[in-house]
Amino acid sequence: MKRILLVVATIFAIACTEQRASISGAAIIPQPLSITEHQNAFELSDKTVLVCDAEELAPIVAYAREYLAVGSTAKVAPSTNYISFALDASLAEEEYRLSVSHDAVQIVGGGYGGVFNGVQTLFQLLPSEVYTKQMPLPAKVLGCNVADKPKFAYRGFMLDVARTFIEKDNVLRYIDYLAYHKINKLHWHLVDNQGWRVEIKAHPDLARVAGFRGGDSPLRSTLGKWNEKYGGYYTQEEIREVVAYAAVRNIEIIPEIDLPGHSEALLRIYPNMLCNYTNTDLDINGNYDNRNVVCATKESNYRILEEILSEVCALFPSEHFHIGGDEVNMSQWKRCPDCLAWLKKRGYTDGYKLEDMFIGRIQTILAKYGKKPSVWNEAAFGGGLSKDAWVHGWKSPKICKQVMAKGYPTIFMPQQFFYFDMRQSEREPGAVWGGCFDVRKVYSFDFAKEGFTAEEVAQVKGFEAAAWSEAFLSQGGDTSIDFIEYQTFPRICALAEHCWGKNGGGEWEEFHNRLYSCHYDRMADMGINFRITPPEVKYENGLLSVLKIDNGTLYYREDGSSRVCKYSRPIKTSTPGKFLFWSEYRDHISPEVAHASRYETIKPKFTLTSSMPENAKYGYDKVMSYKSEARTARACVKGDWFLYEFDEPLECRAVEFYAGYFAMPSRSFPSGYIEISEDGKNFERVADLKDGKILLENPRPIKAARLVSEGALIGTSSVRFIAPKIYPKW
Ligand code: ACM
Ligand code: ZN
């Protein structure tokens, strides 16, 4: 099997490089339903005419012309050398036929979306330079007939611009990337605890003030950067521009105003919308009240919410409007005399009854403005949500199944497969709580393996992936758009295949071949900062080798040397862990990988003390025993410290100390430094902490190490951290 696949891979590679004019149709992503190839290729030249007499397709023709850079447009086809765009009412809305012959390329779609899908397939039949809008002409289009349609009507991606603000131009760029992959819904997460990103004319402070956090904003910086005010928002004019840009690209934008939880940004501007009780220690951290749930029983809240929602409804033509409903901290309602009285009067104790009532009220407001609700899965279990709501199943496949059993059109996005903010391998940046997976696991999602029947699958509305952006600023640095691209591509390619119905046979190797043989080039020319799959390392009989698993070039370097070498044959060594390998393709570089021995650590005994008391459940013994994370019993302030005292002076090739937990940037020392002592008495400051941690390479013997905080944590009640990682001398 492997051998056959390798041969297939080679053919793809040849098709995409040496004979770029005749790319195999089989290498399209997402794979079309049916494609038959023939010998009559079309030659695109600057004389090619774009032909269309359907008024509503004019935006597609203009869009295609930008990429193809061909000559004129016409309503009537010449005898030869044209690309035509037409509608055929016998096809479904997003269905299309694409036929390429010597004389013409003809694209016929059931509706606007169908024709647009046909254009994207045409792009993938051309050299990848088409995406640069500077493709050299003439260019050949493979002779073929394609009959194609998506399996799922909802093919979505969720962009969280609340935690990390993404500039309008970058959103537009991202919309292009989605369109190239036939994704047709952008779920735009516009507000959350960390920011309000849409201008509301009746309540201007929401964006003007709560669009920024840190500094003098009432919205404190609990994630991301610590010491500066930063953020941004979109004016209504800009929102309209984005909506129109997306519509040309067959993408409908579904806005989300996340309620009644995740509402810190709203509530810092309007504290009267909180529940009616005096805040307690439970709500306050570092003098900052971080309650984030809108009171469900204050009548005035619904008036303000209607003023806000009515403006947002008017900006988005989408019939659906996402109103959140996830992760509501019910303890706030349960301490509110008004919310409690509402429950008591009806004989309820369950806070979800209040959520149900709240969602029902918002649903009624939306209906006034012609909208139907979309919600996160938590909001589907109270019984009151109308059956025309779309439910986004994020928790797990099992929860999606339960939502479907209630009869809701369900959008599949279980975090374990479709939260693309999760890190892609153990040593790469990203969130950790939902899993650690790359494109291969995304591709492996299988309804049958998850226990879904064919009848259940028929009830699935579609798929969506999410890029939550909590960790983007703290882990992706200031180039956050590059980091989002790295986190989401090529995982979006696998998402696109699921959305389309995975017509490529379902085998990873087959999809992976399509991906690296042709789609790496396309993504590079699209301008995407995508992740390429790292090679695999093997060590046997003293020989260290790497397995090339895509068409990148392999490189390595050895500890102690700055020389970068091209890998050509196995390396004879007794210390395989000293070598780091990676793959490069054009200007894209895979993560570095090494033999497992590089990551082996030792666990020498030490005592940990701190200026901060320990959490009763996650005490410092958890770290001293190298078992799991520990927590302090309060947030740190300036001058707080952790002291590690080793039983024997520590000798190692490297050690990483933590005053925080990389997956939880909000729980780390905001800034600080490390002091080292060789005798346990005299300390010397040797380095600053970065993101709550510090790696010391080839340190002198360490008897004690003290990590000192130079800032105060806000909006949390603990520092969470793990044991030092100590790498033995070779
Ligand atoms: C979610 O991840 N809270 C929808
Ligand atoms: Zn209340």
Image: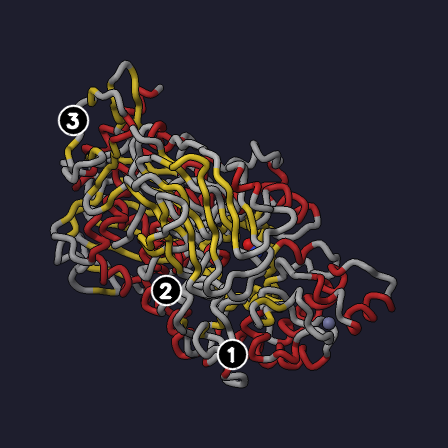
Contact, mark 3 vs mark 1 (Cβ under 8 Å): no
- Residue in the picture at 54% in, 74% down: 313
Q: Is mark 2 on a helix, strand or loop?
A: helix
Sooner in the amino-acid sequence: mark 3 or mark 2: 2
Question: Looking at the picture, does residue 184 appear above or below residue 12?
Answer: below
Q: Residue 693: x, y in percent? A: 40, 51
Q: Mark 3 points at which residue?
A: 568
| Residue 566: image tag | none
Q: Which amino acid does label 2 sit on?
A: Val
Sooner in the amino-acid sequence: mark 3 or mark 1: 1
- Residue in the picture at 14% in, 38% down: 563
Ligand 2's quadrant is: bottom right
Q: Residue 102: x, y in percent? A: 19, 44
Quadrant where the N terminus sits is top left
Q: Which amino acid does label 3 sit on?
A: Ser
Q: What residue type is labelled 1?
A: Leu
Q: Which residue lies furthest to the top in this view?
A: 541
Q: Mark 2 points at which residue?
A: 171
Q: Is mark 2 within 8 Å of ligand 1?
A: no
Q: Quadrant of residue 251?
A: bottom left
Q: Residue 114: x, y in percent? A: 40, 54
User: Which is more toward the observer, 651 or 58?
Assistant: 651
The span from disc 1 to disc 2 (Cα, nearest Å) is 21 Å
Q: How many marks?
A: 3
